[in-house]
Amino acid sequence: MDNQSQTINTEELSTLTSSTDTLFNLLNIGGPVVWILCLFSVFALTLILLKFWQLSIAGAGGKRKTHRAIALWNQGKQTEAINQLSQSQQALPRLIGTTMIGVQHQGDTPQLREELSRLASVEMENLRSYLRPLEVIANLSPLLGLLGTVLGMIVAFQQMELAGNQVDPSVLSGGIWQALLTTAAGLIVAIPVFLAHSTLERKTERIAHDMEVLVTSVFTRNCLAATPVIKTQAIADTQDSTWENTQGATNAA
């Protein structure tokens, strides 16, 4: 049993070594362009993991905490609502907490709204950081792959020219697939990075929307609570006026 297990481990190690050797061979065949694309992929993966972590914390966790504080704020418990957000380091709760403090001390003033707009811009700029490098990598990787393919095709046709009349088709086909390897590597890097960039950008836009909505909800606290009463009273006044006009017309007749 031990011999069989040892044999299996040896086969797995041999397969892993063979796969690693194949990978390095492909990197060497692809040349400097493929190595540059590998560096791009490592850099992009690091940024993607960092941004997903940052936006996940700023989005879901911060939004739950902020909604609890907004509920307290709408109930008139201003101090408790501010305390809910005062110690938070997340972008959304920090901005809403600042808004509550400003409204509590100053009320709704144009200066306060301008300052909150500035703070929101600062927070969003922080959340959008490092998205541009991902966009550059997604756009540049296919171009680098195409450049590697063009360079590889130039080398292949140079070999054909040097061979003269004794052209070996295997030499040409080998040069072509080596050249196309860089295009494939560029697309392999670009497609996941493009998808990740689109997802992260959408998360950022959602946080910006939440900021706008929740800041507005602090200023418009419970302003709709009296709306049904106002509408009901207006309808009642209209009905009374109509009834009085009807009665007046009947009496005149």
Image: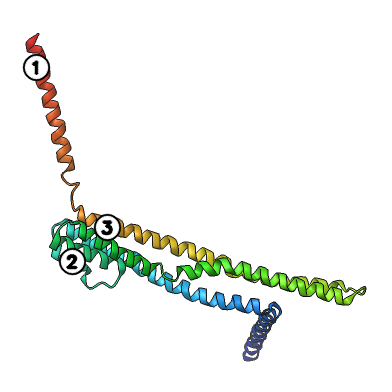
**Gap between marks 2 and 1, in whole Å?**
56 Å
- Residue 154 locus on image (x, y percent): 76, 72
Mark carried by residue 127: none
40 left or right of 16 in image: left
What residue did someone put label 2 on? 82
Q: Secondary structure at mark 2?
A: helix
What residue did someone put label 1 on? 247
At label 1, the amino acid type is: Gln
Which residue is at a point 49% across and 71% down the rendered structure image? 133
- Residue 134 locus on image (x, y percent): 50, 69
Q: Where does the C terminus fall, quadrant-wise?
A: top left
At label 2, the amino acid type is: Ile
Badge 2 local density, few (<14 within 10 Å), some, or many (20+)? many
- Residue 149 locus on image (x, y percent): 70, 70
At label 3, the amino acid type is: Leu
What residue did someone put label 3 on? 214
